[in-house]
Image: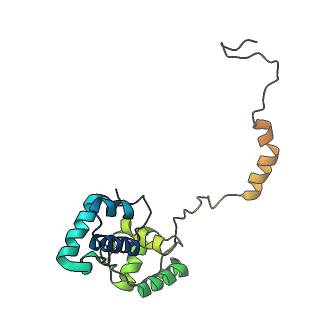
Amino acid sequence: MGNPAGVRRDFEALEERRFLAAELIRKGVHEAEVARQVGVCRQSVNRWAQQLQARGKKGLQQAGRAGRKPKIAAKDLQRIEKQLKAGAEAQGYQTGLWTLPRVAQLIEAECGVSYHPGHVWRILKSLGWSVQRPTGRAIERDEEAIARWKKSRWPALKKKPGARNARSSSSTKVG
């Protein structure tokens, strides 16, 4: 079943639900009724009852942190973000573009932690950064000449709707 995509589990609320079920079990309420009251399946209530009997209320507590601990501390992330804001040129790159491999190199240089460039985007996302693509424009581009062309030449080239009573080239259209 699980949670919908992007929705985090509220571990405190889940623990409270287990404790509520434990209280009901201790009062002698049938497992099926406990399941209905706390909104879970009967098998979950049965498992909680077994844990309650084996380990007491401690058996129903949160397991703690889910997943692997982060390799980078919060203070290190602040340092990395400060370097990112300074720009790629400040790090010695020719352009101001931060690519994932460049960010991975920055993290390794600052924190001594190696990340595959394909995973660096998660760190950037946690810092509130998003993908930005530079506009590809030619250095020789003349904006004034383009504006003149759009104003004078383009209207003459642009297709215009034909006359209302003009004959159609469609074989299915009468007229």
Q: Nearer the viewer, residue 171 or 71?
A: 71
Q: Residue furthest left?
A: 54
Which color scheme is applied?
rainbow
Q: Position of residue 167 (x, y in %)?
A: 76, 15
Q: Nearer the viewer, residue 79 or 162?
A: 79
Q: Position of residue 36 (x, y in %)?
A: 36, 59
Res 39 visible: no
Q: Quadrant of the N terminus?
A: bottom left
Q: Quadrant of the C terminus?
A: top right
Q: Residue at x 40, y 72 (%)?
A: 13
Q: Position of residue 7 (x, y in %)?
A: 44, 64
Res 132 visible: yes
Kindly indicate the quadrant of the structure image that contains residue 18. Answer: bottom left
Q: Nearer the viewer, residue 92 or 40?
A: 40
* Left or right: residue 164 compared with residue 49: right
Image vertical order of residue 124 relative to residue 162, above or below: below
Q: Nearer the viewer, residue 145 or 171?
A: 171
Q: Residue at x 82, y 45 (%)?
A: 152
Q: Residue furthest front?
A: 28
* Left or right: residue 4 compared with residue 141: left
Image vertical order of residue 39 relative to residue 75, above or below: above
Q: Residue at x 47, y 70 (%)?
A: 125
Image vertical order of residue 61 relative to residue 132, above or below: below
- Exactly how many numbered labels are in the figure? 0
Q: Residue at x 39, y 79 (%)?
A: 107
